[in-house]
Image: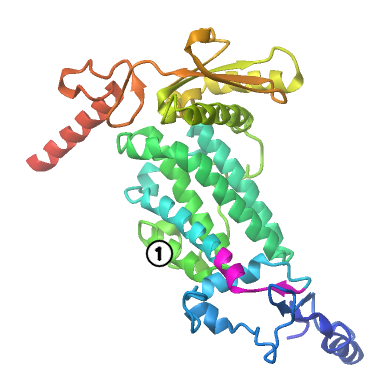
């Protein structure tokens, strides 16, 4: 019926079909035939030339999907990658396409799939009904990630509504890259080393499951096949997911316990976001140590954090460190886990290492933080790689730290119960 939601055509139709339709509809019905008009540019090659059969630079969409005659030059990318290219470009002007451009888009599609694979692979034993952790019970790191994801999902939603697909795609890719470099890295110890039913593992799985579900939803309008693949790979029956298909599941849903508060500030999340500045400075110091050959893995390090006593940024950072230090989830939120080192302390709790022990010092004037790196005390645990004074003290588990020994004993006890049953 008229008016339709959207008229979509090339920019050459401003004085063509768009105008003729408008004039006719106004004359006959007294209203425009459309609610909105979206115009787009034309495809050009990497040199900005229009696609032309005589030039021989035309790219057949079928070659992108199924592969061209030269598979090295144009391998089969599939329909999702072609759709991702469309959603990535600025369609308000002419858009370039070439084998090199599609190769880059293909890398982005693979990156999205790999991030989804990580989430799905780590929630294989997660039951939302019995294992889910509500927002207020999450560690501060998890609450920070949920709040960041809420902001990104909101930006994507607004961009889709404004037909700004490029902006939505850019926001999603940037978020997934940040998610991989920060949250996934910090999550590995929780997911692989912790006891299966521990709070630190189940809370992380709660976040990953929620992220995977909503990733499928926001991918649906663009990479529809990948979105459905993710949805079908989510553990549990359709009733657990809320729908048999992602395209019947509605739009983004709030994290459990966050209903009615989406977008609102959370003190723990804000504090954690602020102390990420310490991680950035520490990473620079650790890289110096690696290049010098003094240390290998970051778990070989001890980090001492000093914060200036004056300046707005420094005082804000001090307050945030105090908030995070008071977290009841120190097995997730403590400074050493954030920095990825075996031991960490601050000038508020311990003196700086002696000059002879220092391996590197890095200061950030803007945030007022200084990180001093020295060698971690203790022996390396063969299971988690953390350097700890408890390694070698347990007769039954000489190569393990006390934490890993407890997890192994719990696992063995569980295996014995299964065999007895």
Instruction: Answer with left or right where residue 261 lies relative to residue 76.
Output: right
Instruction: Answer with left or right where residue 421 lies relative to residue 89.
Output: left
Residue 414 or 169: which is nearer the viewer? 169
Q: Residue at x 57, y 30 (%)?
A: 284
Looking at the picture, does residue 213 appear above or below residue 202?
below
Q: What span is in magenta? A: 94-105
Question: Residue 255, how many percent across, how many down?
Answer: 53, 46
Looking at the picture, does residue 138 appear above or below residue 241?
above
95 within the magenta span: yes
Farthest residue in the left direction? 420
288 within the magenta span: no
> Tag 1: Cα neighbours inside 10 Å, few (<14), some, or many (≥20)?
some
Q: Quadrant of the C terminus?
A: top left
Q: Please tell me whether mark 1 sits on a helix, a strand or a loop.
A: helix
Residue 40 falls in which quadrant of the image? bottom right
Which residue position holds label 1?
A: 232
Q: Residue at x 58, y 82 (%)?
A: 61
Q: Quadrant of the N terminus?
A: bottom right
Instruction: Answer with left or right where residue 243 lies relative to residue 158.
Output: left
Question: Residue 201, how many percent across, how many down?
Answer: 38, 37
Looking at the picture, does residue 394 appear above or below residue 11?
above
Question: Which colour style is shown?
Answer: rainbow
Residue 160 in view, yes or no: no
Question: Residue 280, how many percent across, how many down?
Answer: 59, 31
Question: Residue 38, how many percent across, how many down?
Answer: 78, 75
Q: Residue at x 55, y 60 (%)?
A: 108
């Amino acid at each position: 019926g008229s008016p339709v939601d959207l008229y979509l055509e090339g920019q050459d139709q401003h004085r063509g079909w768009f105008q003729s339709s408008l004039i006719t509809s106004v004359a006959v019905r007294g209203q425009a035939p459309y609610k909105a008009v979206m115009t787009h540019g034309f495809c050009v090659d990497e040199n900005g030339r229009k696609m032309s059969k005589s030039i021989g630079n035309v790219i057949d969409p079928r070659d992108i999907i199924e592969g061209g005659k030269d598979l090295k030059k144009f391998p089969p990318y599939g329909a999702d990658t072609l759709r991702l290219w469309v959603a990535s470009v600025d369609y308000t002007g002419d858009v370039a396409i070439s084998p090199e451009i599609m190769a880059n888009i293909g890398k982005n599609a693979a990156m999205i799939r790999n991030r989804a694979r990580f989430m799905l692979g780590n929630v294989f034993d997660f039951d939302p009904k019995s294992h889910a952790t509500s927002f207020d019970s999450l560690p501060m790191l998890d609450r920070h990630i949920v709040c960041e994801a809420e902001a990104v999902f909101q930006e994507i939603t607004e961009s889709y509504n404004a037909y700004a697909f490029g902006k939505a795609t850019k926001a999603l890719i940037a978020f997934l890259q940040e998610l991989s470099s920060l949250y996934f890295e910090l999550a590995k110890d929780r997911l692989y080393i912790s006891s299966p039913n521990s709070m630190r593992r189940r809370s992380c799985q709660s976040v990953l499951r929620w992220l995977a579900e909503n990733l499928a939803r926001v991918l649906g309008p663009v990479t529809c096949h990948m979105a459905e693949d993710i949805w079908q790979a989510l553990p549990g029956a359709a009733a657990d997911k809320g729908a048999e298909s992602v395209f019947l599941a509605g739009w983004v849903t709030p994290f459990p316990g966050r209903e009615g508060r989406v977008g609102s500030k959370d003190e723990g999340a804000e504090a954690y976001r602020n102390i990420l500045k310490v991680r950035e400075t520490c990473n620079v110091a650790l890289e110096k140590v690696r290049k010098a050959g003094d240390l290998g893995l970051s778990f070989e390090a001890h980090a001492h954090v000093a914060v200036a006593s004056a300046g707005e940024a420094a005082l804000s950072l001090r307050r945030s460190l105090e908030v995070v230090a008071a977290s009841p989830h120190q097995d997730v939120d403590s400074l050493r886990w954030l920095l990825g080192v075996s031991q960490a302390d601050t000038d508020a709790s311990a003196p700086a290492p002696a000059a002879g022990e220092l391996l590197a010092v890095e200061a950030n004037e803007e945030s007022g933080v200084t990180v001093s790196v020295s060698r971690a005390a203790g022996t390396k645990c063969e299971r988690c790689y953390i350097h700890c004074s408890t390694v070698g003290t347990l007769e039954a588990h000489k190569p393990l730290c006390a934490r890993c020994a407890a997890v192994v004993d719990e696992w063995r006890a569980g295996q014995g119960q299964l065999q007895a049953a």
